[in-house]
Amino acid sequence: MVTLKAQEILTRILTFGVLAATLFLEAWKSSEPINAPKMLVLSTCGLSALFVIGASWNQNLWRRYKPALIALIVFFFFCTASVVFSENSYLVGLFGTKGRSTGLITYFSLALLFVAAVMVQSKRAYEGIVRFLLIAGVTNIVYNLMYMFGFDPIPWNNPYGTILGTFGNPNFISSFLGIVVSVLFAFTISGENKRIVRILAASIIPIAFYQIIYSHSIQGIFVSLIGSATVLYFFIRSKWESRNLQFAYLITVFSVGLISVMGMLQKGPLASLIYKTSVSLRGEYWAAGLNMGMNNPLTGIGLDSYGNWYRLYRRPSAMILPGPSIVSDSAHNVFIDFFASGGFPLLIAYISIQALVLISIWRILKSGRSFSVTPVSLVAAWLGYTSQSVISINQIGLAVWGWVLGGAIIGYSLLENKVVTEQPKTKKPAKVIKVGRSEAAVSLAAIVGLLVGFLIALPPVRTDMAWRSALKVGNAGAVEAAMNMWPHNQRTLNAGIVLFANNGLPEKALEYARLDVKENGESFVSWYTLYQLEGVSDTEKAKIYKKLHQLDPLNPEFSK
């Protein structure tokens, strides 16, 4: 166990981190308002947690949390390997692509928050995580109501015509609200809570569910049903000892779930109600991701690099639906994304982490039959997140909950079961272990970690702000200065090239197009932009044409 001071600081980091990563966005000065700012929050909190744990480290921590620590070390190792061996720019692997930001910094930070949630070992901390989940949920509900009544305080372009929450996409806010609904349901039926709390929770549920429907995304409906079904199972288990009743309930839930899945696949009685064209699209995206992993089984194609390789690995059927010009930068399945990114090693590492959480849920079930709102909420919310991760993208505002809730479940199970690591037998007198450092040292470590984490993730946010500022100024010099800022961003480079080409600066466009293909040699978009520019000789165009066919072999536009 970490020291009491470290426990206190880790609790603050976790509760602030999940709330800030959910709510924080920057749409006033950035062209990418969602994920880059959220990555900045993650890195700041994750590195702070790392420094706090390091400042209070002792050998008992390794013995007590060995399985979780080993799984996380292996996961980070193979994430790093996928970046090192990727043919894409190391900047993509480190910071992620613009609009996703799920590179090495993000996953390292998520893993650190996972470890912090395991080690904090405090019921107060786990109660705080659940409470801050509800705070983030209510904040989004209020913001959604403002939008629905015609007032959106966030100055961004909303192409969806529906609620976005603080996630920038109706699917993500729908899923998050589904998680919130399941936790509110736990609070509603829990006898631990005061009557006013139960009434308040019950009154928010229909508002949240209406917003899920208003979002036109069915993800939230399924997430809320899965989470609420989990809550109800815990409740039934606490009220009735009959195993037959519990078994009958699980069979019923499983049957309904199976029929629903069949409906999503255009089969069964619910097909006309549930099926959407997006399901077929996901099938193509999944198949491409599986092809990436199977063809690169040891290191994958690199973190957040799916978009560069989709054209090469898509199936012939993808030429029909979604069509040759429609691409994706994610498999829309977190497990397949990891398989594509890092091959079998990274997939197995991620599955191992999920397995540890499932084992911990089993331990919580074995520890007693009472209905306690905190562990029930943690389990229901995590299962809700995990269910949506099978059909959606690893968006940072949602992913932070999956990792922190998973770590909290493991930590809570250890706390509930009072697992004590035995000291190794030795003939020598027991050596006294210093359990930590001074409180001042731990506090200082937290501050240093905050600064380090902030500085690590700041560059892409800074360059993005410079890019938006340059666009407002409309000056070629400002645009060029923003394009030259480190780290170079493929989408920004491409947008700048197009601006130069369309505004009478073909030499500048050609200069930066060559830089783009040099840094992003496996990007179809980069080569295609160069192919279309003035000043490219016929001989060079012929070579580029062959490269485009190599990167997109099924596209009839670039057939041999």
Image: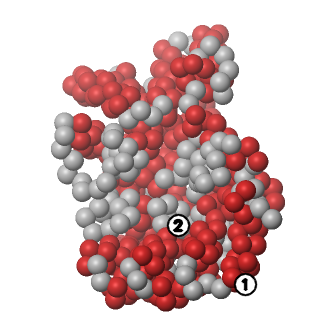
What percent of the width, then of the height, locates residue 331?
Answer: 63, 50
What percent of the width, then of the height, locates residue 295?
Answer: 81, 60
Q: Is the residue 214 above or below the residue 519 in the image? A: above
Q: Which residue is mark 1?
A: 539
Q: Secondary structure at mark 1?
A: helix
Q: Secondary structure at mark 2?
A: loop
| Residue toward you, 481 or 410 | 481
Q: Is the residue 201 above or below the residue 114 in the image? A: above
Q: CA distance from mark 1 to mark 2?
A: 32 Å
Report crowding for label 2: few under 14, some 14 to 19, many 20 or more residues within 10 A (C-alpha).
many
Instruction: Please state, as top left, top right, bottom left or bottom right, where the C terminus lies in the image.
Output: bottom right
Q: Is residue 442 visible?
A: no
Q: Which residue is mark 2?
A: 97
Residue 34 quadrant: bottom left
**Image mark for residue 122:** none
Report crowding for label 1: few under 14, some 14 to 19, many 20 or more residues within 10 A (C-alpha).
few
| Residue toward you, 96 or 444 | 96
Q: Is the residue 355 above or below the residue 1 in the image? A: above
Q: Report the number of numbered marks.
A: 2
Does residue 533 appear left or right of residue 88 in this picture? left
Mark found first going from the N terminus, 1 or 2: 2
What percent of the width, then of the height, locates residue 95?
Answer: 52, 71
The residue at the point 24 percent across, 57 percent down is 155
The residue at the point 73 percent across, 56 percent down is 556
The residue at the point 19 percent across, 40 percent down is 150
What percent of the width, then of the height, locates residue 471?
Answer: 31, 75
Q: Is residue 232 visible?
A: yes
The residue at the point 76 percent across, 73 percent down is 546
User: Could you tell me the amino acid type at mark 1?
Assistant: Thr
The answer to whether mark 1 and mark 2 are in CB contact below 8 A is no
User: Could you tell me the amino acid type at mark 2?
Assistant: Thr
